Amino acid sequence: MTFDSVFFFYLSTLGYALSFTFYLLHAVLGSAKVSALSSAEREAAAGGQRLGIVAGDAALAVPRGRVNWGRLATGMTWLTVAVATVGVILRVIELARVSSWVLTIFLPATTTYETLTFFAWIIPLTYLLLERFYPIKQVGIFTTGLALVMLTVAASPSIAPSSVAPIMPSLQSYYLVIHVFLMLTGIAFLTTGFGATLLFLYERYSGREIVNLERLDELMYKAIAFGSALYGFGGIVLGGLWAKEAWGRYWGFDPKETAMLVAFLGYMIYLHARVRWGWRTPQVAWLAVGGYLLILYAWIGINYFVKSLHGFV
Amino acid sequence: MSCPKCQARGEQSSNFCSHCGPPVRSTVVRDQPSLWERLVAFQQGIRSDLWTFFTSITLGIVLLALILILSLIETLIPQAAWTREVDYIARYGVEGYGWIKRLGLDNIYGSWYFLLSIMLFFLNLSFNTYVRLQASIRWWRTDFAKTETAKLAALPLHRRLEFGPVSADPRRIKGQVRSALRRRFYRVKELPEGLFAQKWKFERFGIDVLHISLLAVIIGLALTYTLGFRTFQTAHKGEIFEAPQGGFSVKVEDFWSENYPDSERIMDWKSTLTILEGGQSVKTQTIEVNKPLIYKGIWFYQAAFGQDWQGAAQVTLRVERASEGKELGEFAAKVDDGFTIPDEGLFVAVKAFLPDFGLTENGIVYSRTQRLLNPAAYVEVYDAKGQMLMRTWTFSQTDMQELVGQLSRDLPYRIRLVGMKAPEFTGLQINADPGLPVAYGGFIMMFMGFLTHLFFKHKVIWVRLEEAPLPLHLTIGGMARNNPISFAQEFEQIVRALQVGLNARTSTETETETRALATISEGSP
């Protein structure tokens, strides 16, 4: 055990593996359960769910003596997120220690390892927050699965060495915390939105309505509207303010900046197309998929194409 | 509405028929319109067409997509602002670079097609902002208290609560409902037949503010790019330079870098600058990365730090006679200068130094980076009469030097680059940004717009209390401008709280209708 935070991230890897399994079991066994209910029960459940009054779990009340996988999955994820929170906080302390406390609380997202573990914390967290309002647990398979993959990749020392490095001069700013935090949180929301989009498209094309499409669309819309607002604000405004201080201009067409704008514009197209052509149109949902691909491009892809002032990200 | 002349139905603006052309008028249409009438019609037609064109959301989406694609290309092709011609040729070849230049792909944001699409987008956004703002103002002026409390039962979200004879005191019931709603931040108003409550009506303007903020940011950028400037200045210790457009000069007193304690890693770069006005020192400040000096609207940033290889390098060369391999010694000289070897009667001129030697496809020599990766010097050797004997590139890397040796076996002297040094310099970014206040104003509005739109939704609740027909009952109905699901949750919580607090029972007759969701259709873009 090199660092304490690393240990907690190992623990959360295990946790996400369990929650992923539980979400999967919930999706597989849960849908079978609905058809087992009597038609009257199903009617009542559907009514409650559509109103959003009754949580999905309570509506599809599990008969006594059977395991409620959905609830188990949510509980497990909350627990794992709590463990990962400890890991992230420890990482902040470790980072500050090697940077000799330059009067700033650092965001643990400066190396590949930190970014991956940070995402493995924030993506399930944003998903859980959304799940409270929209208990569509099929999306949980995607978010916890993704967190699991990220932590597994982070565990490989060759791809993501877990050693703590001091923060370089150009990153020593309060904006590092707030700009990067908003952008990453935005991406986390958009990731949940992407999971919902995948489910939406699956339902649209397979014709099987696992979850009420209207609710699914609202989750998708909420996650994306919230995520792109955070992403856009964190990028255009806070990134601009920081760039003004560090490079002398708030906008300079640096490739990474532009790529951020491109991804933001992509989501703006989705949001306006949703108004213009209606959410039921599958092409509109495809625009959301395109938006997420642009996010991936701006976040990771761009680093392989061009040299940018953001060379350190 | 149908056109009075051609009777065509369908999409018609208020003053123009899309089918037969002339304006839709309720007056009698003459067979032969006068020239004036035709002109008026023509002008109205154009106006209406332009209006339809610029207020179209589809146009906005198309322009967004266009800007997106152009920006995407910009991220893939390095832009002329930070790329040298040699780098383009090294990357795309002469032919490819020719095409990039012809299409303006090396300067997309300065190209006519990008500026045109941005201008169209700006117009489209302005028109749509205006249209939407009008609708928001209409919304703001609408008195929702007056809207049809009689039709409460027609609202998608409504409930009916009945009271037994014990709890049936209309005044007390009203009071309890009022305080229950106030606890949830509703502003409650008394109506003759019951209560009217609403909250967060202002949120309708969130998106408007957001759109206006975008317009402001675009205007700010345009101001900066037309009226501002941006330069890069390298300076050695003690150097004084003239600030562009400022009418004052700046002296670089000192600069240095600081490491992390017990580490090789750089913690910060710093420079101490003094502003001189008419020879008088006005202000002295130490700047560092992320902490600029601002004077008279001009910003000075610590932007770079390093060794001035291409400006003022000094090289050390080892010279030996090729025929017998006799070493003549090591000599040092600056670029654009040289040294003499008296024994041989030679003068060696150092013409150029590159820290990272590279060759383009068509044989142009350039420095790939500013780091000392593959240093090379270009030298010319003259005899006592000033006759040039040879010229060659010389390297410090062994494999490169061997290659030169093989290519130039018949040269009289072998020269090798054995040492190099350069003075340190500090790189300052200097700029003026007149669009800054406008853009920052836009930033603040953007923040407020996002906040309003994401966290608030206009919610309206009507309550009607009726005694006839008995028993005393209360009908509560509500709607939200958006967010039907979360509003349905809130509504249900309110109803449940009332039910418990007032000891009422819900009648079952209307319950099946509550399944559909409540939203208000907006009727505006």
Image: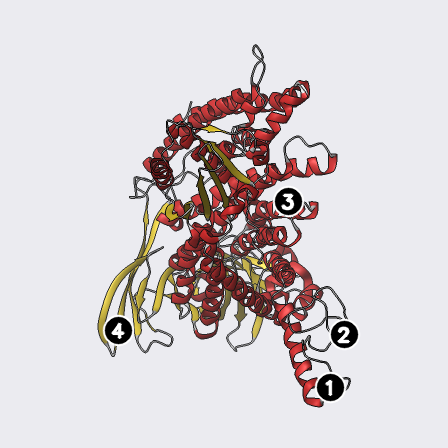
| Disc 1 residue crowd, few under 14, some 14–19, many 20+, Cα 10 Å | few
Rendered image: mark on residue B276: 4
Left or right of B296: which side holds B359? Answer: right
The quadrant where residue B92 appears: bottom right
Chain to which the residue tagged by mark 1 belongs: B
Residue at mark 3: A289
Q: Quadrant of residue B302?
A: bottom left
Q: Secondary structure at mark 2?
A: loop
Q: Residue furthest top?
A: A65
What residue sits right under mark 2 in the picture? Answer: B20
Q: Classify residue B183 by image quadrant.
A: top left
Q: Residue at x 47, y 58 (%)?
A: B142
From where the camera sits, is residue A173 visible?
A: no
Q: Is residue A237 left or right of A67 when viewed as pictured?
A: left
The lab-note entry on whether marks 2 and 1 share a chain reads yes
- Mark 1 element type: loop
Q: Estimate the spatial distance between the alpha carbons at disc 3 and disc 4, rounded to whole Å.
A: 56 Å
- Separation of disc 2 and disc 1 at Cα? 14 Å
Residues tagged 2 and 3 counted as in contact (Cβ below 8 A): no
Residue at 58% x, 24% y: name it. A23
Residue B466 visible, this orientation: yes
Q: Amino acid at mark 1?
A: Pro
Indicate which label's residue lies in the foreground, 1 or 3.
1
Query: Chain ID for label 2?
Result: B
| Residue B33 marker | 1
Q: Are marks 1 and 3 on the same chain?
A: no
What percent of the width, then of the height, locates residue A170?
39, 51
Q: Earlier in the sequence, mark 2 or mark 4?
A: 2
